Image: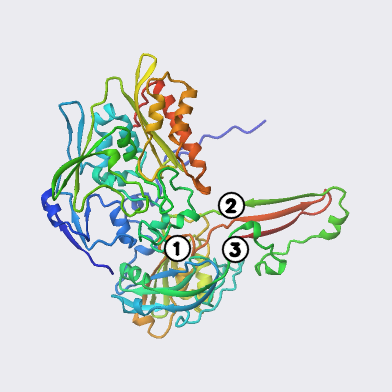
Amino acid sequence: MSPALSPRPPASVIGRRVNRVEGRAKVTGQGRYAADHHPAGLAYALGVGSPIAAGKLLALHTAAAERAPGVIAVLHRGNFPKLTPSPNNFSDGTKVGEVRLPFADDTIFYAGQWIAVVVAESFAQARAAARLIRADYREDPPELSLGTAQWPERSQLSADAPDLTRGDPDRAWREAPVKVEATYTTPVEVHNVLELHAATAAWDQGKLTVEDSTQWVVGARKALAKILDTPARDITIRAPFVGGGFGGKLFVWATPSSPRRRPGNWAGRSSWSWSASRPLRSSATGRPPASASKWARGPTAPWSCSGTTA
Amino acid sequence: MRAFSYHRAATPAAAIAAAGSTTAYVAGGTTLIDLVKLDVLRPARLIDVNGAGSAAITARADGGLRVGALVRNSDLARHPLVREKYPVLAEAILSGASPQLRNMATTGGNLMQRTRCTYYRDGISPCNKREPGSGCAAWEGIHRSHAVLGGSEACIATHPSDMCVALAALAATISLQGRAGRRTLPFDAFHLLPGATPEKEHALLPGELITAVTLPAPAKGERSWYLKLRDRESYEFALASAAVVLRLQGRRIASCRIALGGVGTKPWRAHEAEAVLTGAVPAEALFRHAAEAALQSARPRPGNAFKVELARRVLVRVLALLVEGQPSVRQI
């Protein structure tokens, strides 16, 4: 005999219309997102994206932008402080969206990749100056199609990809009496978040507070501790509101990882607001790329799987 | 930063007197302010015309309706006379943009709405509309949303307005005021085809200001409707849309006017389809024949070829709906 269903507890939210706890703040504009914080003396930084998708950055012309009204600095490979790459390990919380640090080299891996960051007194001034930056490139043929992308070798997979091999797949495959093989593809998915990727960071007596647009504050803290070579206990990540993430804000991108501490800070500023402008939203930060997976199995063989993305 | 000055005009005459070659009129600002922020439009001076004209909707003695240029889209769509006599217009407005944008956008401004071609808006790509002579990145580029009717090798940018498609089907008249005085233009003569000069989008003379849009009196028994097909059901531009104004007499179609949206470089009046339908007995095969005629001159690119059939089908659908009866405008 099945137990009688107990009546729904009066406090249950199931089946009832319940306001979001932050609903009032959000619809009245009181919900302050990462870029809504403007501490005194804040400087505004805006990334400048590469218009080409593959090649080398040969020269960067920043003089006009540096002279533009309100500009404090133009950061690029030539003057950017050295950061430490994150170990990028999911299980210890240091997974990042992009292992390569901003301005680590002259190679262009994708359209929209930051080639410079303009820092100015206001967002509008940073945006206006960013339009004055010119660059010379050597353009290589970009990889535009999953169909022509290379299947990766096992050694090219990320360092923390677990080895799930059990038994002897090669032998089992050779000896399988019936074999099933298939390739599955998925299209690219673009996260059209309403709140763009942004971070407002402030150093105060050796301690860093970042208002970050992130879905994983603990991970952001651990990854930033590595990247900025700062004890995690000195870093606070705050994200009371996230205006859409869809997984695209799980891991640290360039926005919060750039406020490197150095003596006196850049141009004497201790507070930074970093933003990805809307056209860069879906290029300088991540999304699930198009993917292909090959699956093979014999009735007695273990699954075998390899994948590629573009 | 690019500085500009701002001038608030109190009357149309004052606005026109203040206009020059580097000025822009601003009303709702829903297109202009975006494009100034993107550095695509670079006016040295903005002339705010919000206080310089009519925001009234007035019934005319002849049964028509005069809509002041400053009437907000939301006010126009919810006006009882519009909902009753011009359902095609209410439905077109309500299928466009978002409530916030419709609360700001004006009737005159909607006529001046700019294309959503991403190459026009990105400020970098070759674009003959933004920078004459620089080429058209869309021609060989990503042109899924671009026009299949009325384009040229210089430009295939789609006209984005829903409201204008309804106004084309209603055969509205546009009232203008300029340095040389007042004049009117038939709706179809207002927007220009891109040809070799896509930067020239309309027939306005320098400094000329839109003051009103007049809708003709609907004929007795006239029905009208707008249907829009798009990638998502809200806050999205049309892939293909159709506005139809139609009157039945006995078993036959006594008169009809048709315009297509999402597929043309301007709000696209389909005279060829009207000729097929006028005087004929409604039937599925006839609608299909009319739709074929409407898209006869389509010149798609590889990425937007699907729009030709999509536009035919949306037109067939609207014709079938209207022959059955007058659909009701959505509630707001």
The numbered dot on residue A264 is: none
Q: Amino acid at mark 3?
A: Glu
Residue B164, position in %: x, y?
A: 31, 40
> Is A91 in front, or is B13?
B13
Q: Which residue is mark 2?
A: A187
* Label 1 vs label 3, nearer the camera: 3
Q: Which residue lies at the image location 27% right of the left edge and 68% below the top edge?
A: B2
Q: Earlier in the sequence, mark 2 or mark 3?
A: 3
- Going from N to C along the chain, the mark reached first, 1 or 3, is 3
Instruction: Return the residue at label 3.
Output: A143
Could you say where residue A119 lies in the image, as x and y percent from the top left?
Answer: 36, 74
Q: CA distance from mark 1 to mark 3?
A: 19 Å
* Dot 3 alpha-carbon crowd within 10 angstroms: few under 14, some 14 to 19, many 20 or more: some
Quarter of the image where the C terminus of chain B is located: top left
**Chain hosting mark 1:** A
Dot 3: element: loop
- State left or right for residue B292 relative to residue B204: right
> Residue under circle 1?
A280
Task: Verify CB contact (< 8 Å) between mark 2 and mark 1.
Answer: no
- Classify mark 2: helix, strand or loop: loop
- Location of residue A85 in the rendering, given as x and y in whole percent from the top left corner: 56, 76
**Residue B124, quarter of picture:** bottom left
